[in-house]
Image: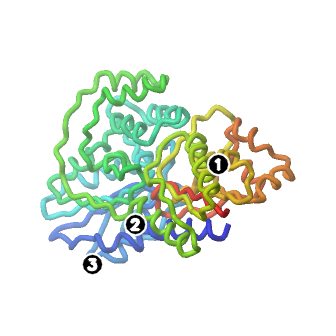
Amino acid sequence: MDLLRRMFDAAVRAAQPEHCLPPHLPNPPRGRTVVVGAGKASAEMARVLEAHYPAPVEGLVVTRYGHAAPTTSIEIAEAGHPVPDANGERAARRILGMVTGLTPDDLVICLLSGGGSALLPLPAPGLTLADKQAVTSVLLKAGATISEINCVRRHLSAIKGGRLAQAARPARLLTLAISDVPGDDMLVIASGPTVPDPTSFADARAVLDRYRLEVPRAVRRHLDTGADVPAEPWGDYVLVARPADALAAAAAVAESAGYKVVELGDAIEGEARHVAAQHAALARDFLGRGERAALVSGGELTVTVTGDGTGGPSHEYVLALMLGCGGDPRLSGMACDTDGIDGATEAAGAWFDAGAMALASQAGVDPAQAQRRNDSGAFFAALDRQVISGPTRTNVNDLRVILVDP
């Protein structure tokens, strides 16, 4: 476990705001600097900005409960994630008000990271927070991808899909973002509050239809009658940290330990157990060739929930990977969410090694049954094979590692 944990820690460290944000801070304007933002890393980004920015700042960022950081002039609000709540709605409304009515001499710095979409739940006219909560819940349970979820969210929002940028005009706007999405798509990070939205209401309807989801009538009516209004681009956008940076840092640790690193990609999407089965087959192939290798990947997996257990995509992946590896003592693996929280658990993820199957038998837990019940969280807790980091205050998506030791 030592090597796996050191790889996870290196990945997180590479995406910490303290390391990646200061080089991208702009020169102060003649007028005010207003800082707004949202995401699991936004509070830490605000703290670092205050420490390095050479002028007074003001503003508000909203982060997930338990992810706050100490600041002096930028207010930190905490709200619900992944299902939005009233605190997020209040913060989003205040943020929109803070950037309205500024002048060309002013500067708005928008700090975004993963989780920002749920943390900025400002409903479009005619919709309520309860409507947005209901839609988010059914999309998550259906296993929709983050791109699909955010497409729907943008079309139910008064702040996302470039609407925050339009409110900030004519002030100068700079967005500094930590990417947590496959392909580093700026539109998908926090649902793109400062990025024009090229998708349509028809695209949002198609997502709901694809998964045959029942949603509140007001939501369906809004999506059926909404008119697409292309927004003009406004402001500059800089990615200060990406999933690829985290994977490279983890890979360097494995290489220093004598492993041949095989990067499977930093933008892998799909059902967690299906991806795990594919990766287990790759691991067995390397084992058959007698190669000592570390298979490293990132991205964001999903889980179609059919059982009544607890867990998250990383836990589910590790459980399916362990089953796919068949208890071979020469294979070990780990998957963690770099924000420190995987699904409905208090763990970043889980891991297994040569002794995992024997531990399961001793603990009286059946991995196949746990998989059927989507109960990977309880399974790895019983084995004491969870990775506990607490909130990392950054988020560049998942890190997955398989170690092959012939």
Q: Residues within 10 Å of mark 3 (few under 14, many from 20)?
A: few
Task: Work out how far the residue at label 1 is from the one at label 3, CA to CA, in angstroms.
Answer: 49 Å
Three-letter amino acid code at disc 3? Pro
Nearer to us in this view, 277 or 38: 277
Front: mark 2 or 3: 2
Residue 106 image offset from top left, x and y in percent: 18, 63
What residue is disc 1 on? 321
Which residue lies at the image location 38% right of the left edge and 34% below the top edge?
A: 152
Front: mark 1 or 2: 1
What residue is disc 2 on? 45
Tag 3 or tag 1, which sits nearer the N-term?
Answer: 3
Q: Residues within 10 Å of mark 2 (few under 14, many from 20)?
A: many
Tell whether 292 sits left or right of 297: right
269 vs 218: above or below: below
Which residue lies at the image location 40% right of the left edge and 73% below the top edge?
A: 19
50 vs 196: above or below: below
